Image: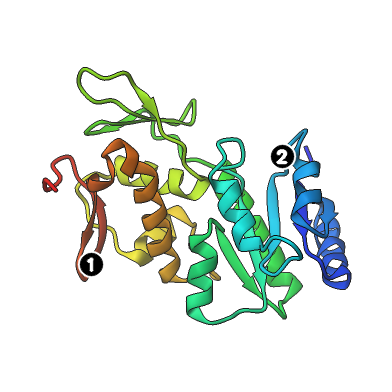
Amino acid sequence: MTQRILIVEDEPSIAELIAINLTHAGYKVEKAMQTELALSLMKESLPDLLILDWMLPGKSGVQFAKELRSNDRTRGLPILMLTAKSDESDKVSGLDSGADDYVTKPFSPKELIARVKALLRRSTIVEDTGPLAVGPLKLDPSSHRVLAIWPNQDPRPISLGPTEYRLLQYFMANPERVHSRGSLLDKVWGNEVYIEERTVDVHIKRLRAALSPFDCDRYIETVRGSGYRITKTPTES
């Protein structure tokens, strides 16, 4: 089945350039010039990936991304942020808003296609680890569900974006081991050449934020100077 990509970009020439390249790459493409139209197009069915411009009329792409991430229906939608802002602080802001990756203008169509393919591959291919458990966290790859199960409490589902899900799955399959940022890029992102190590920190922050309401964020530990790990015996906060 052909994968569907929605482009939210208010500059017609840029939107058309992206659309032409994605169509040639074999994707079905839809375009919207503002967030209201994008929401209308997503009402019946979600795209497989959203390419979202930072600066949009009415509502910014950053605000739109935050709203999508706060909605259970769109929380797992892969988002590629497109913008002219290239400072590291801007990249972090874009990722913090909920984007999974970030491309700056002017961009290479070849790079854009590579990032799109990487995001789609990351969101659809999950290694078969079997059911996993660390502390109160339970993860079942067959149903793609994550639960927090505390004694004397009903199981509570945890909603994660695609990258955060893969991070948690990898951590839970390798508990207590310290993983460097480079190692996580290789294992979770698939050694994608365009991804920066700083991106790992942003997604760890998002994973912890998703786990925090269930008192599970403390199971993800930072090992200063080395990386991150999941532990069965976190330090009491």
Image coords of residue 104 (percent x, y): 65, 76
Q: Which residue is mark 2?
A: 46
Query: Which residue corresponds to the image point at 55% horizontal and 70% vertical from the top-left?
Result: 194
Looking at the rendered structure, the secondary structure element under dot 2 is: loop
> Mark 1 belongs to which amino acid?
Ser
Q: Is residue 235 above or below residue 107?
A: above
> Mark 2 belongs to which amino acid?
Leu
Q: Is residue 149 above or below residue 102?
A: above
Q: Residues within 10 Å of mark 1 (few under 14, many from 20)?
A: few
Image coords of residue 22 (percent x, y): 80, 59
Quadrant containing the N terminus is: top right
* Residue 24 falls in image quadrant: bottom right
Q: Earlier in the sequence, mark 2 or mark 1?
A: 2
Q: Residues within 10 Å of mark 2 (few under 14, many from 20)?
A: some
Q: Which residue is mark 1?
A: 226
* Whether residue 115 is visible: no
Image coords of residue 40 (percent x, y): 80, 42
Q: Nearer the viewer, mark 2 or mark 1?
A: 2
Query: Which residue corresponds to the image point at 49% horizontal and 25% vertical from the top-left?
Result: 143
Q: Nearer the viewer, residue 149 or 108?
A: 149
Q: Is residue 54 left or right of residue 57?
A: left
Q: Is residue 76 above or below residue 183?
A: above
Looking at the rendered structure, the secondary structure element under dot 1 is: loop
How far apart are the alpha carbons under marks 2 and 1? 38 Å
Image coords of residue 57 (percent x, y): 76, 65
